[in-house]
Image (cartoon, rainbow, N blue to C red):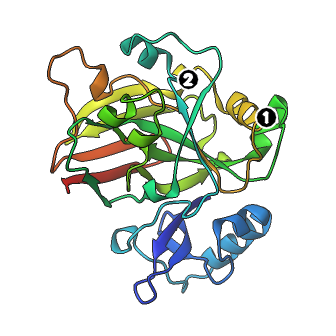
Amino acid sequence: MKLLTFVDELTGKYHLGVLTASGVLDISEDFETLQDVMANKEKAEALIEFYLEDEHIELKSIDDIKLGPVVPNPEKIICIGVNYKRHAEEMKIDIPELPIIFSKFNNALTAHNSTIKIPSDTYMIDYEGELAIIIGKEGRNIPRDEAMDYVFGYANANDVSDRSAQFATSQWLAGKSYDGFCPIGPYIATLGEIGEPHKLRIKTYVNDELRQDSNTNDMVFKSRGLVSYISKYMTLKPGDIILTGTPEGVASGYKTADKPWIKDGDTVTVEIESLGRLTNRFEKE
């Protein structure tokens, strides 16, 4: 399944949809939230198959709907820092022995095709294309060999960062949690859709210029290890998002005096195999 949320034009509320080869199927009458699908995955798959057999079923064009964040209100957004070997090398940081955990808040969430505001008092805005894990089942102290049973699927994300605020102190949170600094989408692909999640090409473009071009196999800590490790410290809940880190090629890693920071009017696209393209425009406040 490829699941997404979109905005109802009349009510302004989020509806749950399934992206198919022919368009988007609205399943909000059967499943109110993404967590409802997670709790009834087999029922959801059977129901979707039943609907799609009806040649008269109404499907929406993805180009005609306004998308929402793939998880509109997760309990937690957990981020992993310095989790690609070559990114650690470009930043001249030792490869961590344990995952570096920080967080974003829900105010940072936004969707594919949304416009993100650049704060008026900063110019060091950086892009970080990332693979996001979407948790599908509650768990604590999850054994590593069972960790994938708790993963519902994956999505594109951009861990947008204000580097001036991020590195002003030893804590990264301030530079990571401006409004709109966590676009995620356009959809969640369940495990069956993407196969091996750590053999995916991941790319980031700024105004169609390729800036990041790597593969998720360069991760230091992969899905099993991350889910197991994080669950030692907190209960993971359905809908929780784990941003798994960014590869090399970020603006702050450029060996030039003038870094290619995101500017007013720039468009940034994160593209991951089997997960489509997540695009956002940036505008100065």
Residue that badge 2 annotates: 219
Mark number, residue 68 = none
Query: Which type of secondary structure does the marked residue at label 1 adopt?
Result: loop
Measured from the top left, where is residue 111 in percent x and y? 41, 60
> Which amino acid type is shown beneath numbered disc 2?
Met
Q: Residue at x 46, y 45 (%)?
A: 157
- Residue 52: image location, x then y, percent: 61, 75
Q: Which residue is mark 1?
A: 232
Q: Secondary structure at mark 2?
A: loop
* As drawn, 123 above or below 14: above
Residue 25 is drawn in which quadrant? Answer: bottom right
Quarter of the image where one finds residue 45: bottom right
Q: What residue lies at 36% left-to-right and 30% top-to-bottom?
A: 168
User: Residue type at mark 1?
Assistant: Lys
User: Around disc 2, counting alpha carbons within 10 Å, would you say few (fewer than 14), some (14 to 19), or many (20 or more)?
Assistant: many
Left or right: residue 102 versus residue 232 is left
Can residue 159 be seen here? The reply is no
Q: Residue extending furthest front?
A: 169
Foreground pick, 269 / 11: 11
Residue at position x 34%, y 68% from top? 63
Relative to residue 104, is residue 261 depicted above or below?
A: above
Residue 248 in picture, x, y percent from top left:
38, 22
Considering the image in quadrants, where does the C terminus appear?
bottom left
> Of 77 and 188, which appears nearest the observer?
77
Residue at horizontal 38 percent and vertical 71 percent from the top: 66
Question: Which of the two labelled residues, at mark 2 and mark 1, occupies the earlier sequence position?
Answer: 2
Q: Position of residue 179 (x, y in %)?
A: 38, 56
Quick check: 137 left or right of 259? right
Instruction: Identify which residue, 162 or 185, lies in the foreground.
Output: 162
Q: Quadrant of residue 146?
A: top right
Q: Is residue 128 left or right of residue 4?
A: left
- 162 vs 26, nearest the viewer: 162
